[in-house]
Image (cartoon, coloured by chain):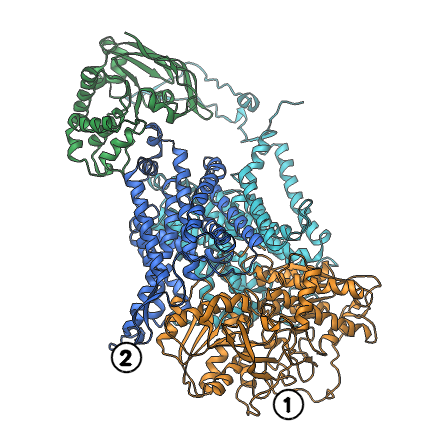
Chain colours: A cyan, B green, C blue, D orange
C-alpha cells in the first residue's frame, strides 16, 4: 500500500483530474434533478438552491468577516418581495428583476453596515436579530411612519405568481423555451434557471474571497485591530462586507420567489435567519462548498424527518419530526464542529494532501548575488552560489 | 540545601510547534534563580510548562511530588504560586476580592484575613486602594497586587513571569527590592523569568540562559554578569 | 381631553389613569423581560455564548410544574422549588456534556447546539403534552379575577394592579437580591465572578473553571424555571410555544443593558417594557402592532452611543 | 419545512375581504332581520383555531357575498353545476381503478407554532377507518389520509401540494389550511384537475365556481360573521353607541378589522378603539387601549388563548359590557372555561356542536363521534375541537364520494368535484341548517349559526334563546 498521505501538487495532472471530477459531479447533479428525480422534487431542489445562495451571502459576513448576522432573512425577503411585486404587479420579466433585487439588498445591507462600524460582536448580532423581527411586521404594516407597505406587498395575504404547469395558464408562467430538452416541465426549467444563477453567484463569491477584498475581510475577521493597523480600513470593509453579502442573499431571495411562487410575511421571519445560520455552520463556515451543503440540508432535513418512514421510528408525527431534526443538528455539530466541509477535509487529508506547486529549480535567476560595502563599492562574489533544490516529496515527507 | 524544584528533560509546545526541547534546571530552597532569554526563546513557555498550563513531557518534581500530567487547577495547593505574564488581574473585582481569590484553595478564614492585612502592610499602596476595582490600578500597582495575590496561598516557591513588563525603570527597581525582601525576610524561594537581565541578576543567586528552547548557559549571578556573551546579548554593552 | 395638542402625540396620552395603567403594564412586562434577560446574562458572563434554547428549557420546566401541581396535586411553590433544583442539575449537565466538548473546537458550534436543543425541547414538549394550550395554569400568586388592587376606578380606564403583576416584581427583586448575595458574599460567587473576569488566572489560583461554567448554566436554568412559572401565570398562556417570543425580548433587554451585567438586565428589561407599551400609546404615526419595531429602534440608538450596552463592561481587545 | 417555532405564535388565514365583496354585500337593501343559513362543514375551533371552525352565516340581511342577480342566467335554477374538464389530463375523467385506494390529502401545518392543526388529519383518519371497516370504503375503494407538512408557510405549500398530486396521486385534497397557502396552490389543483375541497379558511373567494371550479370553501367566512356582529349589536343592544375592536395582526384578524371598520360606521356606531395585536403580545397594553375609549361593546376579532385573555383582562379592567367573540374561539373546554366567571355577558356565534359542551352530551351525532374516536382513534383526544372538525370534513367527503360514484362515468375526480359543488346534507357537527351548496346560486356551504350567550356557571352556550342566523341559499357566488 502506498505510503499515505499521497502528495498532490497544485496544477499537477492529479489535481487536474480532481478538478475534472468535481465538474463532472456538478453536471451529474444537474442531470439527476432534471431527469432522474421525480418532477415534483425539482421544485424543492430549486428552493434548496436558492437557500444555498442566501447562505453563501451570509457566509461573506459571518464566515469571512467573522460577524454573526441573524438578520439575513430580511435581505432574503427584500429580494423575494422585489421580484414578486415586479412580476405580479408590473409584469417584469423574471431575469430583469434580479438586478433590482440585488441593488435593493445592497442598499439595505450598506445601511445595516453603518451601525456595524461602532457596534461589535454579540451586540451587533442583536441589531441584526432586530432586523429579522422587524421585517415581517413592516411588510404587514399599513402605517409604518406613514408608508402603507401592506398595499404594496399584499400584507398578511402574501403574494402569488401562479407558476402553473406548462400549457394551460395565462398570466406569469416560467415555461421551458423551445430549445430546452424535450420533456422538461416548468419545475425542471425553474430549477435550471436557479442552477445557472447559483453557479454564477458561487463563482463570483469565490473570486471575491480570493481577491484583495477577500483577504482584507479575513484579516479583519481574525484580528480587527491588527487588520486596522496594517491598512485594512475597517469602516469601508465592514460596510462593503454587509452590502455584498446582502446583495447575494437578496438575489437568492429573488430566485426563491420564482421557485416557491407564493410568499407571505412570515416566510421571512426569524426562523429563516436561524435556518441560514444553522445551514452555514453545519455546511462549513468560511468555505465555498459549505453553503451549498448547508442549503441543501436545511431544506431537505425537516422534509425527510417528517416524510421518511424511518427504520425503527416509523412515520413520525409533526412534533416528533421536530425532535428528530433537532437531534440530527446536535449530532452533526457534535462530531463535526467545524462543519461538514472541514470534517471531510480532515478525512481527506489522511489520504491526499494538496500542496502548492513549487517553482522548478531552473526558474531561479542565476544572476550572481551582489553585495555592497558601505562606501558604495561592491564586493565580487568569489564563487557561483549553488542553491540546492529539494523536491516537493523530500520537503514534505 | 534541599532542592525544591527539579525540572528534567522538559519538552512542551503549542500543538505541532515544539518550543522546549529538553530543559533541565533546578531551584534550591530560599534561592533566587533567574531565567534569561530573548523574545520567543521559550521563557514563558517554561513557566507555563512547569505549572502544567500546557501539555508537557519530561518531569517536574516539586519537593518529591511529580507535577507533569496534573490538572492546572490542582497546582495551587502544592506550595507553588505563579504570577502570569501581564499580571493576570481580575479587572472587575476589587483589590480585596483579588486577594481573596488568591486564597481560594485555603479554608482557614481567620488566617486568610490575617494574610490580607499583612499584604496591605507589605504593599501599603494596595491598602489605600482596597475597595477599588483592580482594573483601575496602574501597571506597577497591578504587578504588586499580582504578587500579593500569589502570596495569598502561602507558597514556598513563587514563579514570576516577566514582572518588569511594561513598567517604568523606577517602579521595576522598587519591585525587585520587594522581591529580594520577600526572599530574605519571608524565606520565599523565587524563580524569575526576565528579559531585564540587569535588575534580575542584581538579586539573583543563580541564573540560566535559554535560547531556542534549550538551556545554553548556567552559573552564579556574578559569573554570568562577567560572561561577555551574556553581556552583549542581555546587558547591552 | 388633550390639554396640549402636540402633533403626533396621541391626545389620549394625557388621560391620567391611562398613563398610570400603561406604566404598570410596562413595568410588569418589563420585569418579565428582565427575568429572561437574567438567564441570558448568567450564561454570557462566563461562557460568552447566547443560549437559544433558554426559553424552551424554561417552558419545559413550567410544564413539569404543571404536571406536579395540576395532575399530582403538589403545592405550587413546593413544585417550583423542586423543578428549579432539577432544572439547575439539567442545565449544568447540558453544559458539561454538550457544550464543553464543543467549546474548544469552534466558536459557532455551541450556537448551533443550542438551536438543536431548541427543536428537541420544543418538539418534545409538543409530543408529550400535545400542541393545545393547557389550563388551568399553576398559580404561584393569587390569580383570580378580583385578585387586584383597585386604585382609581371612577375614571376610564381603571387604574389597578393585579397581584400576579406584583408577584412578577417580587420574583425579580428576590432573584436579584439572591444573585447579589451569592455572587458578592459567597466564595462560590467570588470564584464565578473571577472566571467571568479572567478565566486563565482563575485556573492559576486553583478555581475549577469548568465547574463555574456549569454553575452559569445551572443558575440560568434555575432562574428560567421560576420565570417560566411566573410568566405562564402572568401572560395566562401555557402551551409549547409560550416562551419563544418572551426569550427574544429577553435577548433585547440583555443587549440594551449590557450582556454581562445583572443590573443591565433589569434596567434593560424595564426599558424594553416601557418602550413597547408607550410607543403605540404615544405616537400615532406608528401602527399599534409595530411596538416591537420601536423597541428594536431604541436598542439601536442606545448601542450606537454605548456599544457595550448601558452597564456592560468594555472588553479590551489585545492585538 | 423547519420548525417555525420562533415565529409569532398564532396565525390564522382568511384573506382580507376584497373591497369588491364588501361593496357587493355591504349595504344593499335590508330585508328580513334574521336570515337563515344552512350550516355544514366541520365545527368548533380547537386550540389555535384559525379558520378551522365551521358554519358560516350570511349577513342577516340579503345575500352575503355578490348579489344573486349577477350570476349568469343561462344556468337553469335547479341544474347541477358541471365542472369543465376540457383542459384536464385524461385521468381526471377516468374512474378509479378497481381496488385502488382513495387517497385524500391533508396539506397543513404539522410542525411549527401552528402544529395544533395537525390533529385535523387524525379526525379524518378516524372517520375514514370507520367507513373502511363498516362499509368497506366507498364503491369498494379503501379510504386513506395522506398528510403533507407545510409548517404554515405559503412558500412550502407549493412543493407539498406538488408532491401530493404528482407523487402520492391524491384523489382530492380536503381542508387545506392557510389563505395564502390555498391561494398560492389552487392553480396547481386546477391544472391537475384535483379537487381542493372544503378548504379550512374563511375567505369568501373560495366560492367562485366560474373562475376556480376546483376549489370550494369549507368554513364560514369571517366577513359574514363580522356583519352578523353588527346586526346583532343593533338588535340586542339598541342603546350601545361606542364600539372597541381588537384584531389579530394577520390576514385572519385583518378580515374582521376591514369589514368592521366599514360596517360599524355605516350602522351608525363610533369606533372608539381599533387595536391590532401581534402574536407575541400578552394583550395587557392592547386591552388598556380598548378600555381607554370607554366603549359600550368590545369585539374580539382574534383567536385561541387571545380570546380568553381579552375577556379576563377586560373584566379585570372594569368593563362589564358585552364582549363579542369569534367563532374560532367557540370551544368551551379550551377557551371559555379558562376565562372562568369573567366570561359572563360574552356572545359567540355558535356554529357547531362542541364535544366538550355538556349540552350536547346526549346528542346522537356527538355520542357517535366520541364512540368512533374511542374505537378507531386510540390516543386521540375527542374533546379537541380540531379532531371533530377533521371527522366532520371526512363525513362530507364520503358523502360526496358516494354521490360521485353514482354519477354517470363512475367515481372520477371530475364527478367528485361536481359532488362537492352539490351538497345538500345534514352534517353531524352542525347545530342546525343544512350543508347546501349548488355552485350556481349558493357557493357557500356553511351559512347557519346562532349568536348565543355563554353561561359560565353551566359552562354551556344558551343556544335556545340565541339569535338564529340562517342564510342558507343566499350566499350567492363570489363576484370579487
Q: In the picture, which quadrant includes the N terminus of chain C?
A: bottom left
Name the spot of residue D379 as percent of width and height, x first.
Answer: 64, 56
Give the labeled residue for mark 1: D69
**Residue C283 showing in the rendered view:** yes
Q: Which mark is residue C1?
A: 2
Residue C109 vs residue B156: left or right?
right
Q: Nearer the viewer, residue C107 or C242?
A: C242
Name the spot of residue A367 as percent of width and height, x first.
Answer: 45, 23
Q: Are marks 2 and 1 in contact (CB under 8 Å)?
A: no
The CA span between labels 2 and 1 is: 49 Å
Please tell me whether mark 2 or mark 1 is closer to you in this view: 2
User: Count the marks: how many?
Assistant: 2
Name the spot of residue A214 as percent of width and height, x first.
Answer: 45, 44
Snapshot quadrant of residue B53: top left
How crowded pointer 1 is (Cα within 10 Å; few <14, some 14-19, many 20+) is rated as few
Residue drawn where x is 70% and y is 81% of the image: D438
- Residue A168 vertical position relative to residue C59 in the rendered view, above or below: below
How crowded pointer 2 is (Cα within 10 Å; few <14, some 14-19, many 20+) is rated as few
Q: Which mark is residue C218?
A: none
Q: Nearer the viewer, residue C110 or A356?
A: C110
Local SS, label 1: helix
- Residue A377 vertical position relative to residue D298 in the rendered view, above or below: above
Q: Nearer the viewer, residue A53 or A240?
A: A53
Snapshot quadrant of residue B97: top left
- For the residues beneath circles 2 and 1, the answer to whether they share a chain is no
Amino acid at each position: 500500500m502506498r505510503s499515505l498521505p499521497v502528495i498532490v501538487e497544485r496544477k499537477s495532472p492529479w489535481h487536474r483530474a480532481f478538478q475534472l471530477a468535481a465538474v463532472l459531479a456538478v453536471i451529474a447533479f444537474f442531470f439527476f434533478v432534471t431527469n432522474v428525480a421525480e418532477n415534483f422534487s425539482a421544485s424543492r431542489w430549486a428552493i434548496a438552491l436558492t437557500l444555498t445562495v442566501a447562505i453563501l451571502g451570509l457566509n461573506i459576513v459571518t464566515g469571512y468577516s467573522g460577524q454573526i448576522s441573524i438578520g439575513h432573512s430580511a435581505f432574503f425577503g427584500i429580494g423575494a418581495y422585489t421580484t414578486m411585486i415586479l412580476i405580479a404587479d408590473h409584469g417584469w420579466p423574471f431575469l430583469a428583476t434580479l438586478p433590482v433585487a440585488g441593488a435593493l439588498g445592497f442598499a439595505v445591507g450598506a445601511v445595516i453596515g453603518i451601525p456595524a462600524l461602532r457596534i461589535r460582536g454579540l451586540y451587533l448580532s442583536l441589531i441584526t436579530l432586530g432586523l429579522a423581527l422587524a421585517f415581517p411586521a413592516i411588510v404587514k404594516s399599513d402605517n409604518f411612519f406613514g408608508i402603507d407597505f401592506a398595499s404594496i406587498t399584499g400584507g398578511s395575504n402574501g403574494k402569488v405568481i401562479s407558476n402553473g404547469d406548462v400549457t394551460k395558464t395565462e398570466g406569469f408562467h416560467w415555461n421551458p423555451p423551445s430549445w430546452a430538452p424535450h420533456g422538461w416541465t416548468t419545475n425542471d426549467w425553474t430549477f435550471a434557471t436557479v442552477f445557472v444563477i447559483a453557479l454564477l453567484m458561487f463563482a463570483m463569491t469565490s473570486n471575491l474571497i480570493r481577491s484583495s477584498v477577500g483577504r482584507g475581510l479575513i484579516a479583519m475577521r481574525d484580528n480587527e485591530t491588527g487588520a486596522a493597523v496594517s491598512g485594512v480600513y475597517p469602516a469601508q470593509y465592514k460596510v462593503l462586507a454587509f452590502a455584498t453579502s446582502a446583495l447575494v442573499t437578496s438575489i437568492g431571495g429573488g430566485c426563491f420567489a420564482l421557485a416557491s411562487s407564493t410568499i407571505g410575511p412570515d416566510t421571512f421571519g426569524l426562523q429563516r435567519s436561524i435556518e441560514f445560520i444553522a445551514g452555514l455552520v453545519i455546511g462549513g463556515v468560511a468555505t465555498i462548498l459549505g453553503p451549498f451543503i448547508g442549503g441543501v440540508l436545511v431544506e431537505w432535513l425537516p422534509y425527510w424527518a417528517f416524510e421518511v418512514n424511518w427504520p425503527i421510528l416509523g412515520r413520525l408525527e409533526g412534533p416528533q419530526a421536530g425532535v428528530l431534526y433537532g437531534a440530527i443538528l446536535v449530532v452533526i455539530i457534535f462530531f463535526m464542529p467545524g462543519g461538514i466541509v472541514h470534517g471531510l477535509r480532515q478525512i481527506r487529508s489522511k489520504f491526499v494532501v494538496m500542496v502548492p506547486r513549487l517553482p522548478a529549480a531552473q526558474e531561479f535567476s542565476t544572476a550572481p548575488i551582489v553585495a555592497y560595502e558601505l562606501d558604495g563599492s561592491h564586493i565580487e562574489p568569489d564563487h557561483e552560489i549553488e542553491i540546492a533544490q529539494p523536491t516537493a516529496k523530500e520537503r514534505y515527507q | 540545601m534541599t532542592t525544591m524544584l527539579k525540572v528534567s528533560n522538559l519538552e512542551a509546545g503549542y500543538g505541532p510547534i515544539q518550543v522546549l526541547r529538553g530543559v533541565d534546571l533546578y531551584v534550591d530552597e530560599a534561592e533566587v534563580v533567574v531565567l534569561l532569554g530573548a523574545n520567543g526563546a521559550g521563557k514563558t513557555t517554561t513557566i507555563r510548562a512547569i505549572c502544567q498550563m500546557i501539555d508537557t513531557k519530561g518531569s517536574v518534581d516539586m519537593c518529591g511530588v511529580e507535577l507533569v500530567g496534573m490538572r492546572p487547577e490542582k497546582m495551587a495547593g502544592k506550595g507553588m504560586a505563579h504570577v502570569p505574564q501581564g499580571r493576570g488581574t481580575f479587572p472587575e473585582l476589587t483589590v480585596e476580592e483579588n486577594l481573596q481569590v488568591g486564597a481560594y484553595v485555603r479554608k482557614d478564614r481567620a488566617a486568610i484575613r490575617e494574610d490580607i492585612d499583612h499584604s496591605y502592610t507589605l504593599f501599603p499602596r494596595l491598602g489605600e486602594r482596597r475597595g477599588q476595582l483592580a482594573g483601575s490600578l496602574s501597571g506597577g500597582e497591578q504587578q504588586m497586587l499580582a504578587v500579593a495575590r500569589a502570596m495569598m496561598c502561602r507558597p514556598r516557591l513563587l514563579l514570576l513571569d516577566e514582572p518588569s513588563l511594561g513598567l517604568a525603570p523606577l517602579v521595576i527597581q522598587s519591585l525587585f527590592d520587594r522581591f529580594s525582601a520577600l526572599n530574605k525576610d519571608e524565606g520565599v524561594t523565587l524563580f524569575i523569568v526576565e528579559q531585564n537581565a540587569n535588575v534580575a541578576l542584581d538579586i539573583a543567586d543563580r541564573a540560566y540562559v535559554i535560547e531556542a528552547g534549550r538551556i545554553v548557559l548556567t552559573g552564579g549571578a556574578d559569573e554570568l554578569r562577567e560572561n561577555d556573551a551574556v553581556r552583549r546579548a542581555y546587558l547591552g554593552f | 381631553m388633550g390639554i396640549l395638542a402636540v402633533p403626533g402625540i396621541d391626545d389620549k396620552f394625557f388621560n391620567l389613569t391611562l398613563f398610570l395603567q400603561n406604566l404598570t403594564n410596562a413595568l410588569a412586562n418589563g420585569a418579565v423581560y428582565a427575568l429572561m434577560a437574567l438567564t441570558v446574562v448568567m450564561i454570557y458572563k462566563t461562557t460568552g455564548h447566547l443560549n437559544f434554547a433558554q426559553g424552551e428549557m424554561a417552558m419545559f420546566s413550567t410544564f413539569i410544574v404543571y404536571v406536579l401541581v395540576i395532575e399530582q396535586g403538589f403545592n405550587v411553590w413546593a413544585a417550583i422549588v423542586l423543578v428549579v433544583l432539577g432544572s439547575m442539575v439539567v442545565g449544568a449537565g447540558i453544559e458539561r456534556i454538550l457544550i464543553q466538548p464543543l467549546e474548544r473546537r469552534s466558536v459557532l458550534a455551541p450556537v448551533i447546539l443550542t438551536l438543536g436543543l431548541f427543536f428537541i425541547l420544543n418538539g418534545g414538549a409538543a409530543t408529550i403534552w400535545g400542541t393545545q394550550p393547557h389550563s388551568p395554569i399553576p398559580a404561584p400568586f393569587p390569580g383570580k379575577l378580583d385578585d387586584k388592587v383597585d386604585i382609581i376606578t371612577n375614571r376610564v380606564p381603571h387604574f389597578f394592579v393585579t397581584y400576579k403583576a406584583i408577584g412578577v416584581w417580587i420574583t425579580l427583586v428576590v432573584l436579584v437580591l439572591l444573585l447579589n448575595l451569592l455572587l458578592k458574599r459567597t466564595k462560590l460567587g467570588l470564584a464565578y465572578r473571577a472566571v467571568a473576569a479572567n478565566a486563565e488566572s482563575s485556573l492559576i489560583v486553583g478555581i475549577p473553571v469548568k465547574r463555574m461554567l456549569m454553575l452559569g448554566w445551572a443558575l440560568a436554568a434555575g432562574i428560567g424555571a421560576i420565570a417560566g412559572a411566573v410568566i405562564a401565570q402572568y401572560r395566562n398562556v401555557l402551551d409549547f410555544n409560550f416562551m419563544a417570543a418572551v426569550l427574544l425580548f429577553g435577548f433585547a433587554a440583555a443587549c440594551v443593558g449590557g450582556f454581562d451585567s445583572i443590573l443591565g438586565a433589569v434596567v434593560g428589561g424595564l426599558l424594553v417594557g416601557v418602550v413597547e407599551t408607550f410607543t403605540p400609546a404615544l405616537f400615532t404615526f406608528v401602527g399599534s402592532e409595530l411596538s416591537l419595531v420601536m423597541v428594536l429602534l431604541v436598542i439601536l440608538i442606545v448601542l450606537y452611543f454605548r456599544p457595550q450596552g448601558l452597564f456592560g463592561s468594555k472588553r479590551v481587545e489585545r492585538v | 419545512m423547519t420548525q417555525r417555532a420562533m415565529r409569532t405564535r398564532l396565525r390564522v388565514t382568511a384573506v382580507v375581504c376584497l373591497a369588491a365583496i364588501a361593496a357587493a354585500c355591504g349595504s344593499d337593501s335590508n330585508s328580513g332581520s334574521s336570515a337563515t343559513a344552512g350550516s355544514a362543514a366541520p365545527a368548533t375551533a380547537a386550540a389555535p383555531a384559525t379558520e378551522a371552525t365551521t358554519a358560516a352565516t350570511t349577513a342577516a340581511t340579503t345575500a352575503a357575498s355578490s348579489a344573486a342577480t349577477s350570476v349568469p342566467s343561462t344556468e337553469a335554477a335547479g341544474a347541477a353545476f358541471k365542472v369543465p374538464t376540457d383542459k384536464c389530463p385524461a385521468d381526471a375523467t377516468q374512474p378509479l381503478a378497481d381496488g385502488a385506494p382513495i387517497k385524500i390529502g391533508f396539506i397543513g401545518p404539522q410542525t411549527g407554532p401552528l402544529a395544533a392543526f395537525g390533529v385535523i388529519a387524525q379526525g379524518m383518519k378516524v372517520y375514514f377507518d370507520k367507513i373502511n371497516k363498516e362499509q368497506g370504503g366507498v364503491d369498494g375503494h379503501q379510504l386513506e389520509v395522506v398528510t403533507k407538512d407545510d409548517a404554515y408557510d405559503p412558500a412550502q405549500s407549493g412543493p407539498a401540494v406538488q408532491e401530493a398530486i404528482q407523487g402520492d396521486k391524491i384523489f382530492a385534497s380536503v381542508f387545506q389550511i392557510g389563505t395564502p397557502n390555498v391561494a398560492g396552490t389552487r392553480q396547481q389543483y386546477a391544472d391537475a384537475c384535483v379537487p381542493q375541497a372544503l378548504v379550512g379558511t374563511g375567505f369568501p373567494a373560495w366560492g367562485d365556481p366560474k373562475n376556480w371550479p376546483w376549489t370550494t370553501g369549507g368554513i364560514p367566512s369571517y366577513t359574514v360573521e363580522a356583519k352578523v356582529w353588527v346586526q346583532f349589536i343593533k338588535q340586542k343592544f339598541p342603546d350601545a353607541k361606542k364600539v372597541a375592536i381588537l384584531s389579530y395582526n394577520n390576514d385572519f384578524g385583518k378580515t374582521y378589522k376591514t369589514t368592521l371598520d366599514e360596517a360599524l360606521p355605516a350602522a351608525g356606531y363610533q369606533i372608539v378603539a381599533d387595536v391590532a395585536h401581534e402574536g407575541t403580545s400578552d394583550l395587557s397594553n392592547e386591552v388598556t387601549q380598548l378600555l381607554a375609549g370607554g366603549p359600550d361593546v368590545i369585539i374580539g376579532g382574534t383567536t385561541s388563548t387571545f380570546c380568553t385573555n381579552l375577556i379576563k383582562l377586560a373584566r379585570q379592567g372594569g368593563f362589564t359590557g358585552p364582549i363579542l367573540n369569534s367563532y374560532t374561539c367557540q370551544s368551551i373546554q379550551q377557551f371559555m372555561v379558562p376565562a372562568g366567571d369573567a366570561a359572563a355577558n360574552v356572545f359567540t356565534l355558535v356554529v357547531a356542536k362542541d364535544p366538550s359542551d355538556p349540552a350536547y352530551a346526549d346528542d346522537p351525532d356527538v355520542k357517535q363521534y366520541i364512540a368512533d374516536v374511542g374505537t378507531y382513534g386510540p390516543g386521540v383526544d375527542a374533546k379537541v375541537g380540531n379532531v371533530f372538525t377533521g371527522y366532520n370534513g371526512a363525513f362530507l367527503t364520503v358523502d360526496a364520494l358516494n354521490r360521485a360514484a353514482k354519477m354517470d362515468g363512475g367515481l372520477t375526480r371530475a364527478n367528485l368535484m361536481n359532488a362537492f359543488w352539490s351538497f345538500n346534507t345534514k352534517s353531524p357537527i352542525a347545530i342546525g341548517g343544512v350543508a347546501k351548496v349548488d355552485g350556481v346560486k349558493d357557493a357557500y356551504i356553511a351559512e347557519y349559526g346562532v349568536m348565543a350567550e355563554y353561561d359560565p356557571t353551566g359552562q354551556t352556550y344558551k343556544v335556545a334563546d340565541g339569535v338564529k342566523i340562517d342564510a342558507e341559499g343566499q350566499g350567492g357566488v363570489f363576484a370579487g
